[in-house]
Amino acid sequence: MDSSIDEAAAQPGGADRTPPATPPRPPIPTMPAPTDPTGAPAAAPAAGTGERVATGLAASGEDGAAGTAGAAASGADESGVPSAAGTAASTAGAGDERKAGPPSSLSPSRASDFMQCPLLYRFRVIDRLPEKPSAAATRGTLVHAVLERLFDAPAGERTAPRAKALIPGQWDRLRETRPEVTELFADDPDGERLAGWLAEAERLVERWFTLEDPTRLEPAERELFVEAELESGLRLRGIIDRVDVAPTGEVRIVDYKTGKAPRPEYAEGALFQMKFYALVVWRLKRVIPRRLQLVYLGSGDVLTYDPVLADLERVERRLHALWEAIKQATETGNWRPRPTRLCGWCDHQAHCPEFGGTPPPYPLPVGPAGTG
């Protein structure tokens, strides 16, 4: 990893330094051994360590804390649409109060939904059907919360034991904000499954310390909500796990994954989310992130990619085409299922024609085919 990016640790003002539109891009050295993931000499803790530094990336002027808090309070994901984990609770007993409306923005998760299956996108965004929380996704939420909160501590205290000690408190907080997750262990009176689930969360957190050294990092932002409107009017939004800014102004976007790294032939799909975020940052600040980094805690791998302008332009064209398809489906009501192996994990089989189900009545006006 470029030492210039990692050395942003001791630069609380680095986030305010705007680099030129096309910063110099020297060759990147090979990823160093896990024992020294930063490739840079240890930096002394900066004054005010643990404080959030506003990068000004959020178009609304809100920092990541505000954006994330708003999403959590509404049970929504980064697209502003109720999340799989939050929908069940927010919908239960209040179905008549939730009015369907046409989609107004696009996030990485909703874009992936439509590419995976247009009907799934409809169920989640238009119909807002409830979904049961999953153990894997909930564990991912828990681990993300722990890694975010760890940076509240001074650099020298960011240790694996301290991180693991945060897990019980963050689990309690998660149950308070998303009561539906308690359903995961409703049939576990002795707490045996819960204990094993929490132990796996501990292993994931501990593995992170073999991939990155938090004592040498001082993120400019954590859980940063970003939103940008393209010239076409398409609004893009999302939540970035971590933003590192070097003293030279170079930006690194980091995302934690609690699953395993994909096989090489699927790496491009995994990077789609990161390129999406890079596009939003570029449109907001005219800065191309120096590096995109996916940290896979499930397998102990780190996937990096250094984007160039052509990458972001391709992603933007792809998103415009995707949005046109979404608008046409919205206006015609023609949402076709796309059967794949992932159907076995879908919560909406009872409403899917591929499984003999019937979708709920379409809640939006329908125009003639081709109006989109």
Image (cartoon, grey):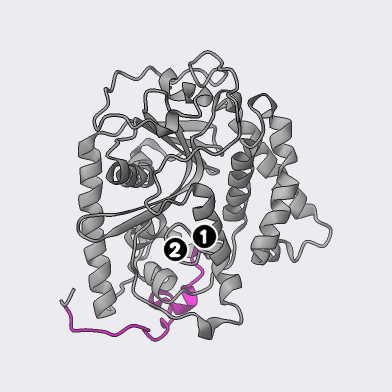
The image quadrant where one finds the N terminus is top left
Q: Residue furthest top?
A: 41
Residue 336 shown in magenta: no
Q: Depth check: 336 or 237 in front?
A: 237
Taking 122 as reference, is 357 above or below it?
below
**Do the residues bearing badges 2 and 1 touch, measured as CB atoms within 8 Å?**
yes
From the top left corner, tell me how far across and down residue 81 is, in percent. 45, 66
> Between residues 119 and 38, which one lies in front from this camera angle?
38
Give the quadrant of residue 162: top right
Q: Secondary structure at mark 1?
A: helix
Most frequent secondary structure within the magenta stretch? loop
Check residue 366 for magenta coloring. yes
The numbered mark at residue 71 is 1
Residue for point 61% across, 71% down? 89
Q: Amino acid at mark 2?
A: Gly
Q: Residues within 10 Å of mark 1 (few under 14, many from 20)?
A: many
Residue depicted at x 41% and y 83%? 358
Q: Amino acid at mark 1?
A: Ala
Image: magenta residue range: 345-369
Q: Assign a secondary structure to mark 2.
A: loop
Q: Going from the N terminus, do you reach mark 2 or mark 1 first?
A: 1
Q: Residue furthest right?
A: 190
* Pointer 2 residue: 80
CA–CA distance in space, label 2 to label 1: 7 Å
